[in-house]
Amino acid sequence: MVKFDNLPAKDGLVALDSYLMSASYVDGAEPTKEDIAVAKQIPEASIEEYENIARWFKHILSFSAEERSRFPGDDAPAAAAKEEGGDDEFDADDLFGDDDDEDEEAYKLQQARAEAALKAKEERDAAKAASGKKKEEPKSQIIFDIKPWDDETNLDEMEKSVREIDIDGATWGAAKKVAIGYGIQKIQIICTILDNKVPSTEIIEERIVELEDYVQSVDVAAFNKL
């Protein structure tokens, strides 16, 4: 059986958390009184800090006092460790008390306190994960209608010239040719912009109109925030 004699020291907690990564219980495939003895040595802050310890601790606490009394093994309760400066109201011995202390309300209180500690850890983990994510910049998608001078305008060259327009924060997307009558086609092209870098569509429209060898006019066919 693996011994965890240096609890609640940090190296002991790290060793226990690592062990519980691949084990359900401290000794074997079923809960024993050794689980209770070890659990009594876990400070409240460590329940929240170590993921595998938290999972195991909550599971052991889910058994009633009567069920825990029937766990195999010797009764050898260890003194509950209190973290320096920790919450004086938290005592693992209270959570794993004897049958004399058990009644329905006390058991509900035990469950609530453990679940509150674990919920606090989950909320901190979620907040930490959220703060680590890069904030996505606001974007918009524009569809431009670009009309040529006549049916002799080379639309492929016109599209190529439009795509060569380089504006910081603007990215060209898919394009297609759309018939507008009398054998003339226009180009519809998508442009995705970063709102903080391209505050107005006019910046892009002005650059497109400068392609005067190809472009007669340009209009915004659609504008959507992403």
Image (cartoon, helix red, strand yellow):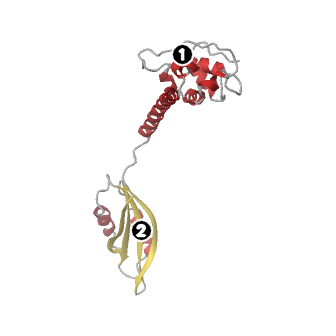
The amino acid type, in three-letter code, at marker 1 is: Pro
Q: Categorize mark 1 by other alpha carbons within 10 Å: few (<14), some (14-19), many (20+).
A: many
Q: Residue 189 carries which label?
A: 2
The amino acid type, in three-letter code, at marker 2 is: Ile
Q: For the point 53% across and 20% down, which residue is it?
A: 101
Q: Is residue 33 left or right of residue 127?
A: right
Q: Which mark is residue 8?
A: 1
Of 59 and 143, the residue lying toward us: 59
Q: Residue 218 carries which label?
A: none
For residue 178, above or below residue 174 = below
Where residue 224 sits: x, y (%)? 37, 63
For residue 183, above or below residue 95 = below
Q: Is residue 2 left or right of residue 170?
A: right
Q: What element carries label 1?
A: loop
For residue 91, above or below residue 125 = above
Could you give the CA–CA distance between mark 1 and mark 2, rounded to whole angstroms?
A: 64 Å
Labels 1 & 2 near each other (Cβ < 8 A):
no
Q: Tell me the quarter of the image containing the C terminus.
A: bottom left
Which image quadrant is residue 72 in? top right
Where residue 204 sits: x, y (%)? 32, 63
Q: Categorize mark 2 by other alpha carbons within 10 Å: few (<14), some (14-19), many (20+).
A: many
Which image quadrant is residue 8 in? top right
Of 225 and 36, the residue lying toward us: 36
Q: Is residue 67 left or right of residue 79?
A: right
- Residue 19 visible in the shown view: no
Of 72 and 153, the residue lying toward us: 72
Q: Earlier in the sequence, mark 1 or mark 2?
A: 1
Q: Residue furthest bottom?
A: 182
Of 182 and 97, the residue lying toward us: 97
